[in-house]
Amino acid sequence: MARLHHQLLLFVLALSSPAPLLLPARADASSFPVNVWPKPVSMSWAEPHAAVPVSPSFHILVVSRPENPYLTSAADRYTRLLLQERYRPIVRPAVNLTATTTLEKLVVAVSEPGAPLQHGVDESYTLEIPLTGGAATLRAATAWGAMRGMETFSQLAWRGMSAVAVVAAGVRVEDRPLYPHRGLMLDTGRTFFPVGDILRTVDAMAGNKMNVFHWHITDSQSFPIELPSEPELAAKGAYGEDMRYTVEDVTRVVEFAMSRGVRVVPEIDSPGRPLILCFDGYSIALHLIRPNAMYLHGPAGAYPDAVTCAGKFWLPDGDWNNRLAAEPGAGQLNPLSPKTYKIISNVINDLTSLFPDNLYHAGADEVAPGCWETDPSIKANLANGGTLSQLLERYVRATHPMVTSKNRTAVYWEDVLLDAAVNVSASAIPPATTILQTWNNGSNNTKLVVRAGYRAIVSSASFYYLDCGHGDFLGNDSVYDDPNSDFDARGGSWCGPYKTWQRVYDYDIAYGLTEEEATLVIGGEVAMWTEQVDAGVLDGRVWPRAAAMAEALWSGNRDAAGRKRYAEATDRLFDWRQRMVGRGVRAEPIQPLWCRTRPGMCNAVQ
């Protein structure tokens, strides 16, 4: 046993040491017979291209100690994936199949297996698959980088003509992400998604090397999460008893995501987007992701003074300038009420216990002045010289320390600083403990945020809002009386047109920034708001457009000469979408099959 342990230790040291290139490499090509998505930073494949059959006893061997249970789970999962591989490329790969040997195993060595999954963790890896079969090797600094490498390895395999899985041989990959934050935001406040749909989405994210699931849990329409300290919020605020996320559900999502190297960042938006529903005499107005809405009122007299404009029609007289909310569902938390802070404190305490990530999204966007102005106590405050911005700052100054005291960095939407009507001073949200997420005015607002010294997450609605271009959900809209009313580029959607995968792929999130300013951009997120999305259409709305952002943030959207590479990316994304469908993700097609079988014939320019 001691001798075996000694041999194992020597093997780990050998894998961890710099190794000479074991195969005849050539310069990276723009495309290979089989490709990886996102495109690796550096990949070479010896010519003539070859592949080796996968042994029926193939396995992934993790030789690093101490054991990381998430890495062990990933190794088992990718072993099954490879042995069960059914993907057959539309265009048969032109490779030489090595029939005299098989690939027996992938040996994984990690230098820091205990490194926690957190923002900025090292996700780099090096993968080598020899021409001679036998054992492929994967080296990474952390378990999370090793997971990225195993994903790359899985995408280099396909089902051959003999129904046997084969894998590219003579390959070397050296890879690491450009941006540490590559996320997807899913809104479960407007539409409830069963846990299974969330897990499938997170699994697809891992396949695209995305690493942040931003869970926009609640919004004006529902409060679907059960919180131990405030059980009435879900009891009265969820759409139904079977449309709530229990503590067990949350734990399942967090653990599932962790096993795939995906962090889960919760958002309860407040004070500005409350939930307002009436059940059995209770009027509940909440908004846990923006600082403007939380209110409970009923026979027990719970929190009648914690919310303003609850239950009122959102757009009085149809006048946007007098709106009580950005969309149906009016009600905002009252910063003057002590009860507001009792509720928010309980919410933050519960969420930081349920979600271990070091980011906490506190929302604070789209505060409607008209809502606060309907409240008598706020009216009196304004009459005595107070301002709406002072009200918001009062709320943020009280709640920001609640977040940071839990060893969390607070994330807010850009509005908290940039909104023209209601905003806070920079001193209320210190850059050292605050990240701002941009969504409006494209690169202009990103520049304003980083120029002020804040780290930025980019989610520009002009590029990354996946709900745009599907019209609006408001009923009784007389604008359609005019047959030409939605013939413009917006198509009835405030953020139209529809964001195609090429629009998403082409966006440079650091556009217009100086080199120093660009260092404050930590990454981006595509956003799936769900006014018109449910489980039936979720996959197609998200994929493969989210995959386009995933590659742009992993290895960029330009080739070695600095040219945008969306033309070259088309065939690769076509193939990746096909593989995702085979993995159970109902991703939308990007072209007819005819195009893939006739390279270049579907281009806009020859």
Image (tube, rainbow, N blue to C red):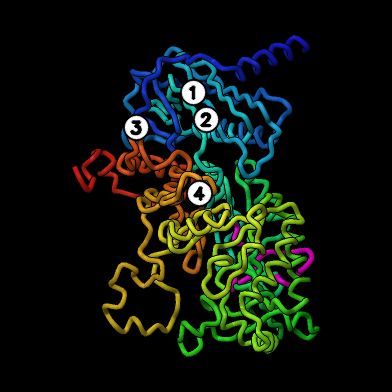
Instruction: Report if residue 228 lies within the magenta region.
Output: yes
Tell me the residue that label 4 is attached to: 517
Give the number of the disc on residue 31. Answer: 3
Give the number of the disc on residue 83. Answer: 2
Are the residues tagged 2 and 1 within 8 Å (C-beta)?
Answer: yes
Asked if residue 132 lies left or right of residue 206, the reply is: left
Which percent across, then down, holds residue 536? 48, 60
Work out how far the residue at label 3 is from the one at label 4, CA to CA, in angstroms.
Answer: 33 Å
Q: Residues within 10 Å of mark 4 (few under 14, many from 20)?
A: many
The residue range painted magenta reads 215-233
Looking at marks 2 and 4 on the same chain, the residue that comes earlier in the sequence is marked by 2
**Where the N terminus falls, by quadrant?**
top right
Which percent across, then down, holds residue 93? 34, 28
Q: Identify whether 117 is placed above or below 225.
A: above
Q: Nearer the viewer, mark 2 or mark 4?
A: 4
Q: Which of marks 2 and 3 is in front?
A: 3
At label 2, the amino acid type is: Leu
Give the number of the disc on residue 290. Answer: none
Work out how far the residue at label 2 is from the one at label 4, CA to CA, in angstroms.
Answer: 46 Å
Q: Nearer the viewer, mark 1 or mark 4?
A: 4
Looking at marks 3 and 4 on the same chain, the residue that comes earlier in the sequence is marked by 3
Q: Identify whether 589 is placed above or below 37.
A: below
Q: Is mark 2 on a helix, strand or loop?
A: helix
Give the number of the disc on residue 54. Answer: 1
At label 4, the amino acid type is: Glu
**Where the C terminus falls, by quadrant?**
top left
448 or 200, which lies in front?
A: 448
Q: Tell me the chief SS of the magenta region.
A: loop
Are the residues tagged 3 and 4 within 8 Å (C-beta)?
Answer: no
Q: Which residue is drawn at 65% across and 75% down?
A: 390
